[in-house]
Structure formats: C-alpha cells, structure tokens
C-alpha cells in the first residue's frame, strides 16, 4: 500500500492557473488543458491573478498581456518576486517583439500568440516545466534580434516610470476616475494626482487622451 500511495503522489499533475479577460478564452483554455493538467483556477484581471497565485501556488501560469486593473506583465513581475519558481507563459494577440522582450526580461518561460495556441500551448508548457523557454516561431527571429538590442530596452519610455506610476497610468487609460484609482490602489486622491502629473511630465504628455493613447501603444491596455 505504501508503494502504491507514493506512486500516485509522484504522478501528481502540474497545477496551472489561467488568466484572461475574455470568458470564452478562459473556458477554451481550460478545456484544452484540463485533460493533461490540473487547472486550479481562472481569473479575469491582473490583480486577481496576483491574489490567486499567492493563494493557489500553481506550478505554471498562462496569462494574457492585456488585462484590466493590472496588465499581465506587471502582474507577472509581482508574482515572480513572491513565487520566483513559478513558470509564466504569455498567450497574447500582440506579435510586437517589445512585449516579448519585456516578458522574458521579467522571467517568462514562454510567449506565444493566441492564434497558434491550440498547436503550440502544450509544447510551451512542456518546455517551461523542463526549465526551457518557448517562443512562437513566427516571432522568434525578431525576438532574438531585439533581445540583443540593449539600447532598445533601456530607451523604453515605460522604463522611466516606477511600477506604481505604471499602475496609475493603466488605470487612467482604462477610464477610471482619480477617486476610483485611489480606492483601487489604497492611496489618497492627492497622491494619485501627484503620480499622474509626474507621469505627464516624464512622458511629455499633456492630456488624459494622450496618456490613454500612450498606454494602448505600449500594451498597458488592450486596443479593443
């Protein structure tokens, strides 16, 4: 009996947490993965992803880049500080290598496009669980070139903002009022206003519309 029980323990399936702000995508990914893996949860925004990661301690996370309240990149940055060994695979519509470069700089194990998920997600998960990295072949060549471009990384306008300022920027771009942002981030209204004015000075932007356009162009919010 002892050997039988240890056998089943060793056969425990990898635990996966899925994050996407589209319910249909979540259900599709769950069905795609649950035959081979233990899908421990699904969430629809970045803040929920950070909370669920701490609570569920998954082996691997499959997350979209563009999600409300906190985008996938910022969520992963927080999660990797708390759970450094968790594997993160980004599944996104963004073919832009700038997003991929940032994802791997954070410590992602995979970056693939949603249109190729059915064919590639299982390969990406297997690679991640084996401590390897998977990149969608269609962007791999450009990814390597831009990854080696240190100037492109250091010159990113987002790099001039603190994590808190990027949070405020995303929430402004999502149409949240100053009061709503203060509540979400547990800050005073004056502090939010201070961050917003600093962001505008740092990025040389002058209106909320310009901030929103910038945030969309840099993947902090979805283009939808």
Image (spheres, rainbow, N blue to C red):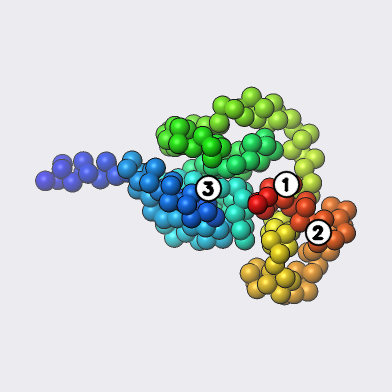
Q: Residue 160 location, x and y as percent?
A: 79, 49
The residue identified by callout 1 is: 218
> Which SS class for mark 3?
strand
Density class for disc 1 (Cα within 10 Å; few <14, some 14-19, many ≥20) is: some
Is residue 205 rendered to the left or right of residue 188?
right
**Which-is-in-front pick, marks 2 and 1?**
2
For image coordinates 44% across by 46% down, the residue present is 29
Q: Are marks 3 and 1 in contact (CB under 8 Å)?
A: no
Is residue 191 rendered to the left or right of residue 46?
right
Vertical arrangement, residue 60 with respect to residue 143, above or below: below
Q: Residue 73 location, x and y as percent?
A: 62, 48
The residue identified by callout 2 is: 209
Which sits earlier in the primary sequence, circle 2 or circle 1? 2
Q: Residue 193 location, x and y as percent?
A: 79, 69
For image coordinates 45% across by 32% down, the residue present is 119
Vertical arrangement, residue 120 with respect to residue 181, above or below: above
Vertical arrangement, residue 224 with respect to residue 131, above or below: below
- Kindly report the distance in space between the C-alpha atoms of the residues bearing marks 3 and 1: 17 Å
> Which SS class for mark 1?
loop
Q: How many marks?
A: 3
The residue identified by callout 3 is: 63
Is residue 163 rendered to the left or right of residue 78?
right
Which sits earlier in the primary sequence, circle 3 or circle 1? 3
Vertical arrangement, residue 3 with respect to residue 132, above or below: below
Which sits earlier in the primary sequence, circle 2 or circle 3? 3
């Amino acid at each position: 009996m002892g050997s039988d029980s240890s056998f089943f323990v060793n056969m425990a399936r990898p635990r996966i947490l899925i994050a996407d702000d589209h319910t249909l995508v979540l259900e599709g990914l769950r069905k795609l993965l649950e035959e081979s893996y233990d899908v421990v949860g699904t969430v629809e925004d970045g803040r929920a992803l950070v909370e669920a990661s701490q609570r569920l301690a998954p082996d691997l996370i499959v997350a979209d880049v563009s999600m409300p309240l906190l985008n996938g990149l910022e969520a992963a940055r927080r999660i990797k500080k708390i759970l450094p060994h968790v594997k993160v695979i980004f599944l996104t519509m963004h073919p832009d290598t700038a997003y991929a470069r940032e994802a791997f700089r954070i410590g992602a194990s995979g970056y693939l496009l949603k249109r190729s998920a059915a064919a590639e997600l299982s390969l990406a998960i297997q690679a991640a669980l084996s401590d390897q990295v998977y990149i969608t072949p269609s962007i791999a060549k450009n990814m390597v070139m831009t990854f080696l471009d240190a100037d492109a990384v250091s010159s990113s306008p987002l790099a001039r903002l603190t994590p808190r300022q990027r949070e405020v920027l995303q929430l402004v771009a999502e149409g949240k009022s100053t009061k709503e942002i203060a509540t979400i981030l547990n800050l005073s209204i004056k502090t939010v206003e201070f961050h917003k004015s600093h962001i505008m000075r740092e990025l040389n932007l002058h209106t909320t519309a310009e901030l929103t356009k910038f945030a969309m162009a840099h993947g902090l919010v979805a283009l939808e």
